[in-house]
Image: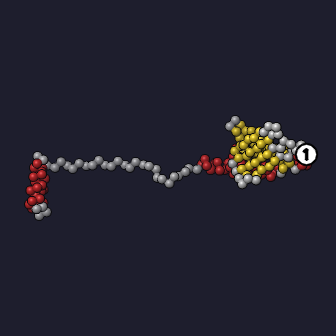
Amino acid sequence: MEPEVIWAAKGQPITGIGAGTYKLTATMLFFEKGMLSTRAQQVPIAHVVDVDIRQSMTQKARGVGNVLVHVQRSNGVELVVLEDIPDPRGAVSIINRTAHAARLVEQQRANTHHYSGVAPTVAPPPAPAPVAAPATDPIEQLRRLGELRDAGILTEEEFATKKAEILSRL
């Protein structure tokens, strides 16, 4: 068997000819049948909703049986028959388990929300408008300037330069 194949079987018809081949992976059920022409299909295993066995008396005596696979399609349920399968009970069991696991994976995928690890981009709140300095009265500015000079914070030269600047704006 191929590494990804979980189960595989070849039908064993009483005539020995026209046997179907069947293969199950974790995601798909493949079946191929035909002698002169070939009919091959694959169905997603998660779409398998039920699996049954049908065995005639002759099949039972030969240790084979038909496995009836009910597949959910967009237009209803389709019945796929895997004919003359050896150990049909084992086939039903493994197909059912694999279908159940695939449906759980699909359900989990549908219910999972992915987080990329990057914080969502949120625009920062707008910066407050710069507060314009109150229009200061030039006379008031000169008075404060004089106070700074009298307190010894400004030299006479710095006072004269700033006074000339204030007076030039008048």
Instruction: Say what secondary structure mark 1 lies in.
Output: helix
- In depth, the one of 70 and 162 nearer the eye is 162
Q: Where is residue 152 in the image (x, y as percent from the top left)?
A: 11, 64
Which of the colour schemes (rainbow, by chain, secondary structure, one colour) is used? Answer: secondary structure
- In depth, the one of 98 and 24 nearer the eye is 24
Count of numbered tags? 1
Residue drawn at x 76%, y 53% as measured from the top left: 1
- In depth, the one of 76 and 33 nearer the eye is 33
Q: Is residue 75 shown above or below 99?
A: above
Q: Is residue 142 shown above or below 153?
A: above
Residue drawn at x 56%, y 50% as measured from the top left: 113
Q: Does residue 147 appear in the picture of this structure?
A: no
Q: Where is residue 141 in the image (x, y as percent from the top left)?
A: 13, 53
| Left or right position of 120 against 46 | left
Q: Residues within 10 Å of mark 1 (few under 14, many from 20)?
A: few
Residue drawn at x 74%, y 41% as measured from the top left: 41
Q: Position of residue 140 (x, y in %)?
A: 12, 52
| Left or right position of 84 against 27 | right
Most distant residue in the front direction: 36
Residue drawn at x 76%, y 44% as measured from the top left: 31
Amino acid identity at mark 1: Thr
Q: Where is residue 100 in the image (x, y as percent from the top left)?
A: 70, 50
Residue on which the image places disc 1: 58
